[in-house]
Amino acid sequence: MSDIKAFNNKVGIQWCPGCPNFGILQALKKALAELGKAPHEVCLVSGIGQAAKLPHYLNCNFFNGLHGRALPAAVGIHCANPSLTTVVTTGEGDCYGEGGNHFIHTIMRNPDITVMVHNNEFYALTKGQASPTTLPGEKRTLQRKGVEKAQLNMPAMSVANGCTFVARGFAGDVDHLTDLIVRAVNHRGFSHLEIIQPCITWSKRPVSWYRERVYKLDADYDSSDRDAALKLLLEQTEKKPIGVLYQTQPRKTMGARFRQTITDRPLPELKPIGAETIQSALNDYRPD
Amino acid sequence: MEDINIVIGGAAGEGVQTVGAVLAETLISQGYAVFAWQEFESRIRGGQNSYSLRIGESVRNAPLMQADILLALNDGAAAKYHGRLKEGGVMIGPSDKRDPAIVIPFADLAKERLESGLYANTIAMGAIIGTLDIPLETLFRVLLPRFEKKGEQVVSKNRRAAEIGFQMAEEKCRDICPWRLPEREERYHLIDGHEAAALGAVHAGCRFVAGYPMSPSTNLLTFLAKEDERFGIFVEQAEDEIAAVNMAIGASFAGVRSMTTSSGGGFALMVEAISLAGMIETPLVIVLAQRPGPATGLPTRTAQGDLLFAIHSGHGEFPKAVLAPADPKDAFHQMVLAFNLADQYQIPVIVLTDQFLADSAFSIADFEVNGSAPEYHLADPAGIQEYRRYRITETGVSPRLYPGRSRHLVGVDSDEHDEFGHITEDVEGIALDMNRKRLRKVHGLQKEIPPPTEYRLTSARTVFVAWGSSRDAVLECMDLLKNDGFDVGLIHFNGVWPLPEYAFPTGKDYVSVEGNATGQLARLLENEYGIRIDRHISRTDGLPFTADYIRSRFHE
């Protein structure tokens, strides 16, 4: 346990007053304190969107990069320095929409990082257009006659493609979400945490609508059962289970071979290989 | 002796490259300078490709089109390339179609005498060695170790195959082959542009590279992946070029020297992230291996068509550097410079290569590491009270730390930001100053860019201007023109952005020589230096410049 106040900073928050994102911010601070982290040991990575502003509001290292590209940047940061706790805070538009290809490949690559996807079911920062998780038929500012695409189910994609930790949280339940973040960060490998984050400005439904429809997974739910997790995730229902949907034995993480056979030190600590090795490599191109 | 040019033609997958590479190495071992370049089609099997070996007593790293010796591995290659045979040249082919001077049915002989068509290419190699009157032992020293893992029988059959080819060529050669290549003392390095660039990156301290395969950039990535244990470098194949460049930027932010590689359309995908690197002031090195565009273009051919694109890549305004090495040795040192500049000025640096430089093997007399060394410019966290990643400074360069190195926190943002890296829309208060701070870096940067190299300027009335890998062909052309009675000089740029301070001599006629249609360097020089380029010699057919090509365009 570290001091949660260490994660406070004085940056003015640009979210709408009362936004459930405040709950996610609070849960993340609590989780980092519970994990015993100090601010300099943490790096938050984001792209663009409301969720992507979060790294500015929490005192730690941060990389607020391009729309959709948080995951590859986080992958690079993690490869360079696995001792940093790297957490991506992103929205579903940023991460499933613009950056969907990266998401799929990050699942497969399995870097030891956590992604928190704030899912509000449309684009908020750009004022209400449909996102990959908008319900089919719902009218949005750019889909005036209703969304014609199917709804993307990224947690199911994760379970199906080798992600070893998939969870869902609710921004309106800070303590439960805190626990999920702690478990996600502690899990070795790519941890996918989707967070239901109702938008109080652009949503057709009030926060209470979501609160009534989320339920915590039973204590006897076996989160190691892949088929059960997929079945749960593929159910066509308004009711949304929250908790750890799927967790299994960690598999090899990205860079495992490199760190076993080459070096396990953070790359920034390594000195250049040295002129002698390079000269000898150059001399390989000249016969004796 | 006069340089000898050997052209080997064959189908993709037939082993043209292997035959060429083994012969090149053999000739280097015999003490000669070799220049080897390849042209090939974008396919795995079929088509007709060529591998040319220019052999001389002194280094001339420029291609020749006309062949003294043409080795056609199949009849199609004989048909495609026989036009390149010089008068007095000798063709070696598998059948009497196209009437080669020396007929050696490589595959049939291999099947008959060695029970496998696999030995056909070794017969062909032996034939070339016989034609050049080089002892077979020199070939064996290069060739046979390649087969040691496959067992004694394979080694001895290869030995036998080479002997068969050698004897057949020797017999038929007696009256028609004037060449003799006795062993010489010299030993040149034989290395291609991307191997040298990769070694330069490693020398510079690069420990992370992410890329997506795309010709002609791929061999740089492949080389580093193969040698990752030796050089301690983390190599990742990304899902696309956007991921590759963002991974490299992420790794660089985390404190490790990082790069990415690409070509044409792949580089186009990276452009947004180049702007990101400029905005968040994170060092980034990109190798852009040019090929003809637009779009997919001619994937396996060469061009110099991306000069202005590279210089202008990225939305918004921010400093960046663009370097354009002339040969592998230059590529090695320029890569070190690229990493040093990226680090010192916290900017993206693009190194422009091309298919010709990437895939050709150049002879280098003295390839020494000395001449460049990694220089680091990170701030010392101990001396800092309150850390501001983007502290406004006179030079524009702010103290750079990386996350986790100390208790100081490092934050970067693609939005306009304050000194701590936090989003801001306070235009008057900080945003304008931040933009000016970034742009100020160009003044220091400009002084670090290598000035152009001048050749024969004093006496020449006409002066070529060129950039990057065409240098040696232009220099060779100047020799030819001298014989024609024209005294022509050269100003060659290997640093193309920001252009260094330079005074163009007055009273000269300037002629640009560039592998693009629109005279991109010429336009740049006209804009930046206010000079006038009178004529343009361009090449856009995907082939590299040769001295002959430039000369005939010059006389038009």
Image: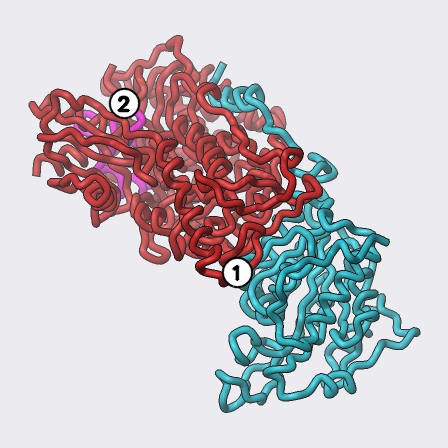
Chain colours: A cyan, B red
Res. B104 in view: no
- For disc 1, the marked residue is B424
The percent position of residue B524, horizontal first and vertical second, equals 24, 44
Q: CA distance from mark 1 to mark 2?
A: 65 Å
User: In the image, is residue B60 above or below residue B47?
Assistant: above
Residue B181: horizontal and vertical position, in percent?
A: 33, 14
Co-location on one chain, circles 1 and 2: yes
Q: Which residues are magenta?
A: B60-88
* Amino acid of disc 1: Thr
Front-most of residues B66 and B100: B66
- Label 1 crowd bin: few (<14), some (14–19), many (20+), radius 10 Å: some
Q: Amino acid at mark 2?
A: Ile
The answer for which chain carries disc 2 is B
Q: Please, which residue is most extreme toward the top here?
A: B185
Mark 2, residue position: B4
The structure residue drawn at horizontal position 43% and vertical position 28%, both measured from the top left corner, is: B333
Q: Chain of mark 1?
A: B
